[in-house]
Image (cartoon, rainbow, N blue to C red):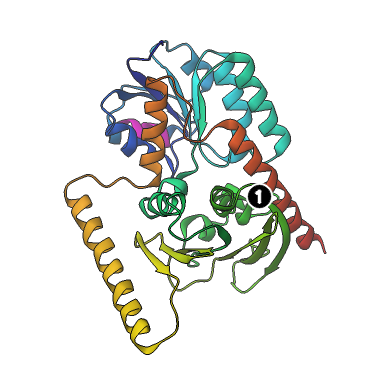
């Protein structure tokens, strides 16, 4: 089997999310960021200087001629993903694309078709799938410890000062569903991971905050996977950042706190005084153990957040000529649900 020896990366787009990519690639021994590209001259110059990148470009046409590049790591706004990914693959480069793959299923299909035609390696960043507590929950579910997962709920809470939300000129506010079109991708791919293929049932939105550039800043969505049910609550008015995932199985429950990277497994019990006391002690011990292990991993530099783990696994898939952790086909299925959700939010804004 043919295997790649080294990955030379060009990071395309030097905005906020690119920092996570720079950090991740720096810690992969068989990869190196050799170029950065952004139409913003100040941003690309700063990125090249801060991360000591040898080559910087302000146009894709200039960068294409730099023959040391193996991979384009696309960190630009969503509406540019399709054209950049297709241009990269047609020019002979592999691609890694920030989430979501595209804003429409039509665009996503074009990227998938191009990848099949060109035969290039391509992957998408679905970073919350690779957060440490999610990976642990995935293993617990596969071990059958909580039985069949029959329902799930995800809460994503952002304060009003969250950078994208507070910036009235941020590109996310110009998407069909506004800020929600950028962030709903996370619960959609997480629910698909634990429940299988999902369909959007209903969306309700509300306006509580004071930002005039946000038509809505509260959302509740329900989904169905066959007979299994799921829900997502998203807010941009929270007192703090919080992300909670509850997985409901026939034999137990898993509760995840993504921000604090903790996980609790609640097995089936009968409501008796003694069993309740034991259960409370067990939950407290689980939280303490998670926190203690997290601290050890951070101190020993064995901690990888979701972005870094996703990028690392994608890099390994390139080196070993294996399937990427998130394929274009998987990302396409997620985009179809996201597109439906965005259209329904947009419909609310017109009525």
Q: How far across and how far down the image is residue 200, in percent?
A: 71, 55
Q: Is residue 24 left or right of residue 144?
A: left
Magenta-drawn stretch contains 38: no
Against 66, is 146 above or below?
A: below
Residue in the picture at 73% in, 34% down = 106
Percent position of residue 85, x then y: 57, 26
Q: For the point 63% across and 43% down, which residue is it?
A: 334
Q: Is residue 336 left or right of residue 259?
A: right
Left or right? Give the position of 311 relative to 300. right
Quarter of the rendering occupied by the C terminus: bottom right
Tell me the chief SS of the magenta region: helix
Question: In front: 22, or 269?
Answer: 269
Outermost right residue:
351
The magenta segment is 42-48
In this view, 91 is above or below 334: above
**In the rendered image, which residue does mark 1 sit on?**
174
């Amino acid at each position: 089997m043919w295997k790649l020896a080294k990955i030379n990366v060009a990071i395309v787009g030097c905005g906020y999310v690119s920092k996570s990519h720079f950090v991740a690639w720096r810690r992969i021994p068989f990869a190196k960021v050799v170029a950065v590209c952004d139409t913003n001259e100040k941003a690309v110059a700063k990125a090249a200087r801060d991360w000591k990148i040898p080559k910087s470009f302000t146009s894709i046409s200039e960068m294409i001629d730099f023959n040391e590049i193996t991979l384009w790591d696309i960190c630009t706004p969503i509406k540019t993903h399709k054209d950049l990914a297709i241009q990269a693959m047609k020019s002979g480069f592999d691609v890694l694309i920030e989430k979501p793959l595209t804003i429409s299923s039509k665009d996503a299909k074009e990227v998938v078709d191009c990848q099949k035609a060109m035969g290039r390696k391509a992957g998408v960043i679905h970073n919350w799938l690779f957060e440490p507590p999610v990976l642990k929950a995935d293993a617990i579910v596969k071990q059958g410890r909580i039985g069949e997962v029959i329902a799930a709920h995800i809460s994503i809470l952002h304060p009003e000062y969250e950078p994208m939300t507070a910036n009235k000129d941020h590109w996310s506010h110009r998407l069909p569903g506004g800020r929600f079109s950028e962030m709903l991708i996370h619960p959609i791919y997480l629910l698909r991971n634990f429940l299988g293929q999902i369909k959007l049932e209903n969306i309700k939105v509300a306006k509580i905050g004071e930002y005039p550039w946000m038509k809505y800043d509260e959302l509740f969505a329900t989904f169905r996977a066959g007979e299994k049910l799921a829900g997502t609550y998203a807010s941009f008015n929270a007192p703090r950042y919080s992300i909670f995932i509850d997985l409901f199985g026939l034999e137990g429950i898993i509760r995840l706190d993504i921000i604090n990277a903790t996980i609790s497994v609640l097995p089936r019990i009968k409501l008796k005084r003694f069993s309740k006391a034991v259960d409370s002690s067990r939950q407290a011990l689980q939280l303490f153990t998670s926190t203690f292990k997290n601290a050890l991993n951070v101190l020993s530099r064995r901690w990888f957040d979701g972005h870094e783990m996703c990028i690392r696994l994608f890099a390994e898939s390139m080196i070993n000529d294996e399937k990427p952790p998130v394929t274009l086909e998987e990302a396409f299925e997620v985009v179809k649900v996201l597109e439906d959700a965005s259209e329904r939010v947009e419909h609310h804004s017109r009525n």
